[in-house]
Amino acid sequence: AACMGALSDCPLGSVGTHVILSSLTNILEWCHGGEDDQLIQIASRMGRNLIMSQYHDVVAPMLLSRTVFCGERSMARTDTQQPAQKSKWEVHWRMALQLFVWVTSISGPEGVIAAQSTGSLLLASG
């Protein structure tokens, strides 16, 4: 829950967002890289914790749509930015999307509703 609160407060491209999203996606990749029952249990617990902390229906839609809303103004690429700065928020956006897709896929009917409403939000804001 503390990580989700921090994600809500940190902009994409920040150090805090990088640490949280990298940790979650690395754990997910590590768990899906093996066939061990313990790895499957770790992935299940992480998914359950993300569902309980409302990642799929509150945090991820906010992160993903905030970037779309701000895309023209503050997140737009400019020629004065250095290459590493240009894509850091994009990498975080993709990581947030990857986690969102995974969590919605394991959360049943509630995940389907969250995916549909987030898709509509992104479509309407783009």
Image: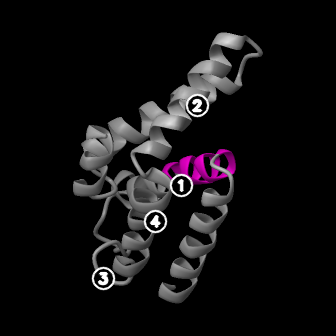
Find the magenta span and give its range. 95-106
Labels 3 and 2: the sequence-earlier one: 2
Residue sitting at x 36%, y 38%: 20
Residue visible at 39% across and 45% down in the picture: 53
Circle 3: residue type: Arg
Local crowd size for mark 1, using a 10 Å CA cut-off: few (<14), some (14–19), many (≥20): few
Q: CA distance from mark 1 to mark 4?
A: 13 Å
Asked if residue 100 is among those painted magenta in the image, a careful observer would answer: yes
Q: Which mark is residue 61?
A: 4
Which numbered dot is residue 73?
A: 3
User: Residue 82: within the magenta?
Assistant: no
Residue type, mark 4 in image: Pro
**Residue in the picture at 39% in, 78% down:** 71
Q: Furthest residue to the bottom?
A: 124
Under circle 2, the secondary element is helix
SS of the residue under disc 3: loop
Q: Secondary structure at mark 4?
A: helix
User: Can you name the residue that lies furthest to the front here?
Assistant: 109
Image quadrant in which the N terminus is located: top left
**Label 1: which secondary element:** helix
Indicate the quadrant where residue 15 lies.
Answer: top left
At 26% from the left and 42% from the top, the residue drawn is: 16
Query: Which residue does the numbered mark 1 point to in the structure image?
Result: 94
User: Counting residues from the N terminus, which is met first, the one under dot 3 or under dot 1?
Assistant: 3
Residue topped by disc 2: 28
As rendered, which of 50 and 24 lies closer to the eye? 50
Chain-order first, disc 2 or disc 1: 2
Three-letter residue code for mark 2: Leu
Which of the two discs, 4 and 3, sits closer to the camera?
4
First in sequence, mark 2 or 4: give its number.
Answer: 2
